[in-house]
Amino acid sequence: MLINKLAYMIMLFFLWLVMEMYLFRFTAVVFYAMLAFPLLLWLLLQLQARRIRVRLELPERLAEKNRPFRLQVCVNNDNRLPVGRLKIRFMYRSIQSEKWKRKKLMIVPVRGERRYSFEFSSEYSACLEFVLQSARVFDLLGLFSVRRPGRQERKLQQEAAEVIVMPRLYELDASPVRANPYVLVESDEYSAAACGDDPSELFAIREYREGDRLNRIHWKTSARTDQLMVKEFGLPVDRSVLLLADFGNEAQNRDELCLRDAVRETVLSLSMRLTEDGQFHLLAWRDGSSGKTERLEVSGIEEFYEAAGRMLQSGRRGSCARRKESIGKAWKKTLRTGSRGRKERRTQNALFEKDGRAKKSRPEGGSGDHAAALYFSEYAREQYTNIFYVTAEKNPLAAAQLLLESRKSAWLSLICFGGHLSAGEIGLPTAGAKLYNLSPDALQQGLARVAYQLET
């Protein structure tokens, strides 16, 4: 734009020289017309900019790892007269990162609505957000520009368009939960969806069906309705299975991102298998933004998708972040059917940094404590039959020793990705606890080995 202004001023200077040298009326008219022309362009630009609207659209809110998804920049031009160029800037990031990446688009808007598509991909599961930073409209000569949207509309544009890159879920041939005769778990809560055999709680009264026990007939209701009615007893809720994920500190490079992704896929694969088996369980992890433990109860497929969405959205950072909202329903449907920063060179539309591009080190959540210490400091009195601890910590020795002390009589399964431990190093007992050192590159085979060893 500066070059265009200099060129226009040079042209005005030559017109002025011609007017002074020849003193023709025509040259004077041309000079003063060209002198007033920028003012007309500026006034026209102010009117035209009001009739241009720009927004970001994501046709799909869910994507798969290593597969491209589209971001659409929708431009609506209601002007009848031609408009100059339109420069659009938007930024994007993973919500676990404070670092935004930026992209720009320079177009000549045509009348009506048109969409411009960009392809992105991510090799890690995450929640990604895209924010429209600015849209600047230029006049026909490129002398002036107006930023769109305006100050009031810009506040509305701060809401980010989000897409979820889903983790890969692996099927387990056997249930990882083992019966524990050494732990007797009592519960004061009963299931609202299924009946059981606890006579202290009445679940429902229904009509008699062939094969029902006679001692469960509700005689008073049967006499009142003139048909046999049967009592169904309550089913105590079993909260004795715990899945605890430890993602470690904030990822610094590609290897650490792979470890965090492996932890996420492992925990959700175990949770999916337990959900399919009808096993009530607890899913817990440390939230990256608050540093606190987040725990959800998973009793069915709806709760599983809700927990998976919450896990992907945890660790949200930055001032442009919206409030957390559930994406569990959208994920279930699919499976069933900033501030200006330093410019970076990018070799592709990747959403995470490559090796050698380290960021400033900082413990996630502002705390150096591992997830096990935070969890058992808050839920120290609870009793479990099975505990699964999946960690990406480089040095999980302290967490492993704490779990051995806190597990009481629960079966303990330690699944390590970041640092490889030995049974003798942590003092692992011969019975009641097992250690698995897995690799993200062979995650499916590692999970199959875990399920097989737990079954046998």
Image (cartoon, helix red, strand yellow):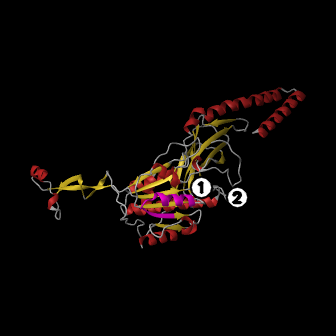
Tell me the residue at 59%/62% (across/down): 418
Question: Which residue carries the number 1 mark?
Answer: 119
Q: Is residue 343 left or right of residue 412?
A: right
Does 184 sit above or below residue 14?
A: below
Residue 146 percent location from the top left of the image: 66, 35
Query: Which quadrant of the structure image shows residue 81?
Result: top right
Image quarter (top left, top right, bottom left or bottom right) of the C terminus: bottom left
**Residue 24, numbered circle:** none
Using a 10 Å C-alpha cutoff, classify the residue at mark 1 as few (fewer than 14 neighbours), some (14 to 19) or many (20 or more).
few
Tell me which amino acid carries mark 2. Answer: Gly
Residue in the foreground of this view, choosing between 243 and 101: 243
Give the mark toward the camera: 1 or 2. 2
Task: Say the numbered circle drawn on residue 356.
Answer: 2
Up-down relation of residue 389 to residue 97 (above or below): below
Residue drawn at (65%, 57%), measured in percent from left and top? 253
x, y percent for residue 197: 25, 59
Q: Residues within 10 Å of mark 2 (few under 14, many from 20)?
A: few
Q: Which residues are magenta?
A: 396-414
The picture places residue 195, in percent across and down from the top left corner, at 26, 57
* Picture quarter with the N terminus: top right
At label 1, which amino acid type do we have?
Glu
Give how far across and how far down residue 409 sits, in percent: 41, 62
Query: Magenta segment: does it hold 109?
Result: no
The answer to whether residue 176 is above or below residue 142 is: below
Give the mark nearest the N terminus, 1 or 2. 1
Given the current orientation, which residue lies at the most extreme right position? 21
Which quadrant would residue 153 be assigned to in this image? Answer: top right
The image quadrant of residue 335 is: bottom left
